[in-house]
Amino acid sequence: MATISRNGCDLYFESHSRDPSEDGDGPALVFAHGMGGSHLSWYQQIPYFVKRGHRAVAFDHRGFGQSRCATQDWHPREFPFDLFAILDALEIERAALVCQSMGGWTGLPAAVARPDRVSALILCGTPGGLAIPEVVKAREEAARRIRAEGVRANAALAPDFPEREPEKAFLYDRLSAANPGLAPEALARMAEPSSQVEVDALTDYAVPTLVLSGSHDLLFPPELLRAVADRIPGAVFVPFPGSGHSTYFEQPERFNQVVSEFLARHGPDGVSARAS
């Protein structure tokens, strides 16, 4: 557990490995949470990937969880550079990224800006800020929902999830409620040009990329995320039938398996063969 300061924000992060004395022993895997989450959101992923030999890193985006940030200092354009600062603090040269929803605004820009530091990218329920018409339309609809219902709305889960798993739905809500909250004018910055990735920036893109989509995702529907995958060179699209926006939370067993298999197939820093 550690905190570093960067551009008006104290960034909180954690690093986990099978042997805490050997943090650099396994390939690094960084988890970037969504707007309703924090580093705690990944409690169903971190133990799984640590057991498989990864060094698992989770952090709080600026303005979320324990990463305190004033409204004037909150902007998504800072996300990838916050990530690089955390990697530097941990002396990690290269890592795979797992990015949920808002976390895609960290992952895709980071992969475009510094592909040498990103061994693989997993986009979960997120367009990553890719500037295509389908994303603009969905982002406007998501903003309408946030204004009307807040970021803790059930739109983040499949419609029947609270009835099927009321305890986990309650936990999801409480994890979201633990965030300090951001002013609407700050959240609106996600739509600014400096927060977007232009399609032209993907011309030479070669980072192995996986796009995961829940069939009941009301924020970024499957047809939109399939369009995103089609625009990212070499990207693989995997649907999650029956899941809402939060595939990692709603279907953790399949989520972990799909991500693990993708990492095993791509890049020199894939899953360690030492898994027990």
Image: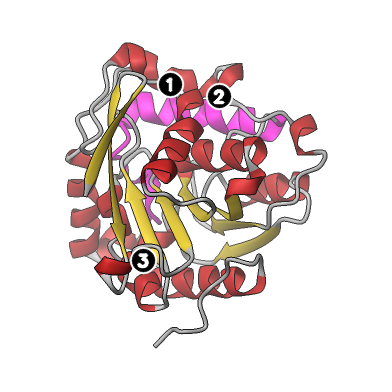
Q: Which mark is residue 45?
A: 3
Q: x, y (%) of residue 275? A: 43, 84
Q: Quadrant of residue 52?
A: bottom left
Residues drawn in magenta: 132-159
**Is residue 64 visible to the viewer in this orientation of the structure?**
no
Q: Marks 2 and 1: CB-CB under 8 Å? A: yes
**Is residue 137 visible to the viewer in this orientation of the structure?**
yes
> Residue 140: within the magenta?
yes
Q: Which residue is mark 1?
A: 75
Q: Marks 3 and 2: CB-CB under 8 Å? A: no
Q: Secondary structure at mark 3?
A: loop
Q: Secondary structure at mark 2?
A: helix
Chief secondary structure of the magenta portion? helix
Q: Which residue is mark 2?
A: 195
Q: In the rendered view, does 185 fall on the left or right side of 270? A: left
Tell me which amino acid carries mark 2: Ser
Check the image and name the residue furthest to the right.
203
Please tell me how crowded label 2 is: few (under 14), some (14-19), or many (20+) other residues with Cα within 10 Å. Answer: many
Q: Which mark is residue 266?
A: none
Tell me which amino acid carries mark 1: His
Q: How is the image coloured?
A: secondary structure
Real-space CA distance between mark 1 and mark 3, rounded to the nearest whole angstrom? 27 Å
Q: In the rendered view, does 66 fall on the left or right side of 82? A: left
> Residue 272: within the magenta?
no
Q: x, y (%) of residue 184? A: 35, 17
